[in-house]
Image (cartoon, rainbow, N blue to C red):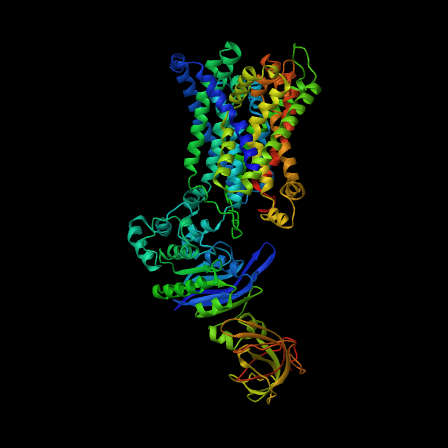
């Protein structure tokens, strides 16, 4: 009973991939060749690849370095640094782009994009690597030292390889975000596949061409997922056993001040600049000549859609998570893996496929609220699944069998044992998805019902008109809404706080 | 020649003192064992010697070289001390051969790795990865890896505790043989008295951050310094005794003393469970007791008794060839006894 439900859910969630292919197929062979042969494709590919190379390298270095300093050294105030280093995630990329562009005219193009995206995305490497360093066993490092390898050699030959799966996972997320990002690049006037798709679709209404570009984008994303799977093929190297013991922190000595300065600089650039920009424009006040819209109305609309999507996504994630959790069988794992694969789909691809589906098969729903909700659900399903899985991991194994053996029917077991146990976790899942969805821009721009403005789209309207002051309250609200989910994510990734204090 | 010498060694965790004046000498080529319950500081002692925990005061000297004197510390990587952690801690990203060769210069690697694989009986498994090995094999690799650079001292931190009982005994014998064969000085840390007694030349019982007693396994088992050491090394019946000349007056009658009399007039006579004899009928010197329970253990039966005479501990433990049903038995004691001071302070 669970298996078919889970399979159907995952099939629905993964369907955008099919739609993208179906629509691209309409272009026909000749047109495909013509479209893909254009110099534009080469340019976009070059832009995307060079940007991804620079940003993943920079995030890997910054993320690993910061994680090592915070988790393995006797740096003063490590707990506070952890939070401060994770918080840049609360600033959506397009808000960060806005804060730099509105303050410094010179920030744009390739280097602007590298700067903005590195500041936005390094926490995606920092968090998993910090978790791996925190929970990993220090014994291997001590053995390396006892075999005559110094601190640096041990760091290079033991610590780094042991954190490789975490590093690879983080870098994958970074590059997937890069592929899907639209708002920040539009603001920085840097063209990538995502911005090109958007322009094709919005300006040219050239659906087939947009679909082809989307297909290339999706292919790139799947290539990345494959690369990560390959890099992590010996992934189960970090031990999380009862025997694992945390390492005593390394004393920094005279390196304390340079290390503190480096972290302070990172936080200042990644968190300080956006906060300063928001403060500056909030005080500077309304600089708009556009009609002012109600912040409250946009907030309510945003929260309504986000909450609706969060509830649906979490409810849909429960059977899939249960199926994979109860059975470690091959089909169960496959179903779960497909669900996670959709994480690689850029927001714009999901949005276009939902549009395509609505136009072709559900015309009455076109530009109606359910369309936006459906887009969010597909987009954030992997996030909900991760959160529900995390909640299920807290359930002691065997309790369901114990309940069954006491004569309770399966459905009653679910209601009386499993769900009550995971309820707090489900709440966290809803919060996580809801808060993340409330700052979504790309898909919202394409899917929102006519006349509806969310915080993100209203912000977009103002910044497109260079009304930076009028945009500031919306940006500030989105940042504030993101903070809880970032703290939640930090806590979930790193485990119970205080273990390493 | 002395291998390792610890002098008045102190160590702390934050404000609490973990090692409180350890004096210990391990001869070159000897196998020593630190025995103690969890939390007694034995792991900290190992980490101080290895160089992962600073000594607060005192000295660690290996082969005449001072490693730590409370002020200056030689870094762990320059001590030439091998380490076999509890669960092996193999490098999961490296093959068995690469694990063993980790601490070797490139030029020596090939020859020495082959030699060590042979030594620990894993020849031909060099290309495996750690997760493809059984627990026992992993520990053998960990041992080979630690032995590869020919360490001046090898530290083993409860290396057998994660293995099942049969394998544990087998591997313990094997490791001891390997270490003797290579002439390695080694310190094993454990909370398992069987392991300590069978493995080591010298056993040091650690209690509350101090060495309660150090000596050969035989000395420790038969002539412990006090009641607590006696209990740490195995089940013990401690019976109050009055001492005269070379005899001990106990509830079981007069028993000869093992070794010389210390001059004290009272003490506790140590009767190991095998020294108690059970009979169904009264016998001279035998005490009437109620049988509380009898556990079959394969090679013998462990019998718990409640003696009915005054001046005896509440329960006695005897190991007998035959089972005893619930009911009564007469307990007698045999053989020379060792006397330890009475911690109750009755000694005058």
- Most foreground residue, B37 or B298: B298
In which image quadrant can residue A274 be found? top right
Number of labels in the image equals 0
Considering depth in this image, is A22 or B25 the residue closer to the camera?
A22
Q: Residue at x 62, y 21 (%)?
A: A370
Work out whether B227 lies above or below B5.
below
Please tell me which residue lies in front, A17 or A456: A17
- Decide if residue A85 is in sight here: no
A81 over B16 or under it: above or below: above
Tell me if A28 is positioned left or right of A497 in this view. left
A218 sits left or right of B109 in the view = right
Viewer-closest of A287 and A405: A405
Q: Is residue A369 left or right of residue A155?
A: right
Quadrant containing the N terminus of chain B in the rendered view? bottom left
Please give the name of the residue rendered at 39% of the width and 57% of the height, measured from the top-left corner.
B140
Is residue A351 visible in the rendered image? The answer is: yes
Residue A209 in the image, given as x and y percentages of width and height: 46, 14
Q: x%, y% of residue A310? A: 63, 29
Q: Position of residue B93 (x, y in %)?
A: 41, 45
**Which x, y percent locates residue B128?**
36, 49
Which corner quadrant holds the C terminus of chain B? bottom right
């Amino acid at each position: 009973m669970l298996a078919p439900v889970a399979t159907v859910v995952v099939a629905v969630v993964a369907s955008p991939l099919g739609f993208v292919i179906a629509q691209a197929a309409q272009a026909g062979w000749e047109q495909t060749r013509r479209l893909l042969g254009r110099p534009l494709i080469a340019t976009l590919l070059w832009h995307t690849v060079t940007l991804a190379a620079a940003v993943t390298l920079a995030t890997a270095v910054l993320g690993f370095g910061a994680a090592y300093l915070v988790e393995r050294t006797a740096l003063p105030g490590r707990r506070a640094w952890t939070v401060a280093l994770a918080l840049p995630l609360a600033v959506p990329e397009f808000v960060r782009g806005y804060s730099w562009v509105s303050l410094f005219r010179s920030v744009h193009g390739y280097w602007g994009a590298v700067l903005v995206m590195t500041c936005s995305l390094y926490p995606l490497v920092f968090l998993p690597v910090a978790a791996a360093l925190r929970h990993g066993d220090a014994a291997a490092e001590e053995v390396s030292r006892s075999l005559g390898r110094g601190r640096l050699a041990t760091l290079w030959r033991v610590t780094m390889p042991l954190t490789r799966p975490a590093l690879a996972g983080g870098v994958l997320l970074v590059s997937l975000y890069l592929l899907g990002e639209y708002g920040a690049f539009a603001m920085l006037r840097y063209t990538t596949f995502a911005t090109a798709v958007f322009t094709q679709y919005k300006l040219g209404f050239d659906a087939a061409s947009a679909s082809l570009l989307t297909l290339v984008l999706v292919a790139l994303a799947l290539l990345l997922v494959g690369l990560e799977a390959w890099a992590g093929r010996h992934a189960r190297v970090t031990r999380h056993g009862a025997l694992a013991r945390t390492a005593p922190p390394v004393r920094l000595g005279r390196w304390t001040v340079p290390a503190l300065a480096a972290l302070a600089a990172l936080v200042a650039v990644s968190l300080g600049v956006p906060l300063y920009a928001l403060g500056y424009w909030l005080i500077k006040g309304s600089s708009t000549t556009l009609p002012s819209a109600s912040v409250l109305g946009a907030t309510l609309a945003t929260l309504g859609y986000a909450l609706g999507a969060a509830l649906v996504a979490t409810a849909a994630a429960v059977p899939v998570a249960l199926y994979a959790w109860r059975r470690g069988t091959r089909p169960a794992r496959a179903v779960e893996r497909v669900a996670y694969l959709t994480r690689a789909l850029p927001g714009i691809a999901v949005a276009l496929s939902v549009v395509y589906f609505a136009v072709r098969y559900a015309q009455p729903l076109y530009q109606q609220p359910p369309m936006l909700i459906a887009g969010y659900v597909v987009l954030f399903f992997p996030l909900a699944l991760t959160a529900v899985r995390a909640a299920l991991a807290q359930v002691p194994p065997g309790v369901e069998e114990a309940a069954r053996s006491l004569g309770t029917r399966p459905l009653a077991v679910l209601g009386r044992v499993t769900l009550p146990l995971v309820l707090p976790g489900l709440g966290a899942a809803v919060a996580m998805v809801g808060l993340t969805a409330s700052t979504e821009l790309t898909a919202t721009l394409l899917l929102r019902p006519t006349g509806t403005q969310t915080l993100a789209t209203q912000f977009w309207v103002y910044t497109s008109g260079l009304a930076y002051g009028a945009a500031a309250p919306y940006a500030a609200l989105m940042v504030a809404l993101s903070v809880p989910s970032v703290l939640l994510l930090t806590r979930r990734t790193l485990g119970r706080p205080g273990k390493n204090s | 020649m002395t291998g390792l010498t610890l002098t008045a060694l102190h160590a702390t965790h934050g404000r609490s003192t973990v090692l409180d004046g350890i004096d210990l000498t391990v001869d070159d080529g000897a196998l020593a064992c630190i025995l103690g319950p969890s939390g007694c500081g034995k792991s900290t002692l190992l980490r101080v010697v290895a160089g992962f925990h600073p000594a607060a005061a005192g000295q660690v000297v290996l082969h005449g070289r001072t490693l730590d004197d409370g002020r200056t510390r030689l870094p762990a990587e320059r001590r030439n001390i091998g380490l076999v952690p509890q669960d092996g801690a193999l490098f999961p990203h490296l093959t068995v051969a690469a694990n063993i060769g980790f601490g070797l210069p490139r030029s020596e690697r090939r020859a020495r790795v082959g030699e060590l694989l042979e030594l620990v009986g894993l020849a031909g498994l060099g290309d495996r990865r750690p997760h493809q090995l059984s627990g026992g094999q992993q520990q053998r690799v960990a041992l080979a890896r630690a032995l590869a650079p020919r360490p001046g001292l090898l530290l083993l931190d409860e290396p057998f505790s994660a293995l099942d009982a049969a394998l544990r005994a087998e591997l313990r014998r094997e490791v001891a043989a390997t270490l003797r064969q290579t002439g390695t000085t080694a310190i094993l840390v454990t909370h398992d008295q069987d392991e300590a007694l069978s493995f080591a030349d010298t056993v040091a019982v650690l209690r509350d951050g101090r060495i309660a007693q150090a000596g050969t396994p035989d000395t420790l088992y038969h002539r412990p310094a006090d009641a607590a050491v006696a209990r740490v090394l195995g089940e013990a019946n401690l019976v109050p005794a009055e001492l005269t000349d070379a005899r001990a007056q106990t509830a079981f009658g007069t028993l000869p003393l093992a070794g010389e009399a210390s001059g004290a007039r009272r003490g506790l006579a140590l009767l190991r469970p095998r020294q108690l004899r059970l009979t169904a009928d009264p016998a001279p010197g035998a005490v009437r007791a109620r049988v509380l329970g009898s556990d079959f253990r394969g090679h013998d039966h462990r019998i718990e008794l409640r003696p009915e005479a005054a001046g005896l501990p509440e329960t006695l433990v005897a190991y007998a060839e035959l089972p005893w049903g619930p009911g009564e038995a007469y307990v007698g004691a045999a053989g020379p006894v060792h006397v330890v001071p009475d911690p109750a302070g009755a000694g005058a």
